[in-house]
Image (cartoon, rainbow, N blue to C red):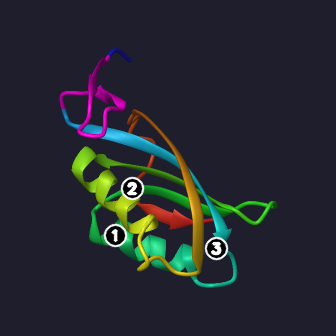
Amino acid sequence: MRFSWRRDDSGRDIPDRDNGDIRLSARVFGVVQGVGFRFWTMGKADELALKGVVRNLDDGSVSIEAEGPEQQIQKLLDWLRSENAPGRVERVEESISAADGSFRDFRAR
């Protein structure tokens, strides 16, 4: 897959694809298990028409892979960092790459 890179408004390099879809790979740390975090994340992703997966990890963090338009991915990131996210998010580590279209919907695992 070939794509070019461009800078977003925050100065990050992100892939620039014709269809505008990108992939967010994120890990969310804090009190994010046992508080409905995956359920609420699925709802937010559905609201934003994103595709991907959210899963609990053994270390107590949550992993999110989401694909969709850059604007919608940014809204998900903003929500993850807001007081509206369930539990207590201490930090979010993310990386952006080109979407590969491997998801059909958004699910919890």
Query: Dot 3, how many residues are within 10 Å of its Cα: few (below 14), some (14-19), or many (20+)?
Result: many
Q: What residue is drawn where x is 34% and y is 39%?
A: 22
- Type of amino acid at the residue the image marks with label 3: Val
Instruction: Tell me which numbered mark, 1 or 3, is placed earlier along the sequence.
Output: 3
| Residue where numbered disc 2 is placed | 51
Q: Distance between the residues labelled 1 and 3?
A: 19 Å
| Residue where numbered disc 3 is placed | 32
Instruction: Tell me which numbered mark, 2 or 3, is placed earlier along the sequence.
Output: 3
Residue found at the very far left of the displayed protein: 18
- Type of amino acid at the residue the image marks with label 2: Lys
Residue found at the very far right of the displayed protein: 58
Q: Position of residue 68 (x, y in %)?
A: 31, 48
Quarter of the image containing the C terminus?
A: bottom right
- Type of amino acid at the residue the image marks with label 1: Asp
Magenta segment boundaries in residue numbering: 3-18
Q: Position of residue 7 (x, y in %)?
A: 27, 28
- Viewed as shown, does residue 95 lie left or right of 104? right
Q: Is mark 2 on a helix, strand or loop?
A: strand
Q: What element carries label 1?
A: helix
Q: Which mark is in front, 2 or 3?
A: 3
Q: What residue is drawn where x is 68% and y is 76%?
A: 33
Q: Position of residue 27 (x, y in %)?
A: 60, 53
Q: What residue is drawn where x is 38% and y is 36%?
A: 99
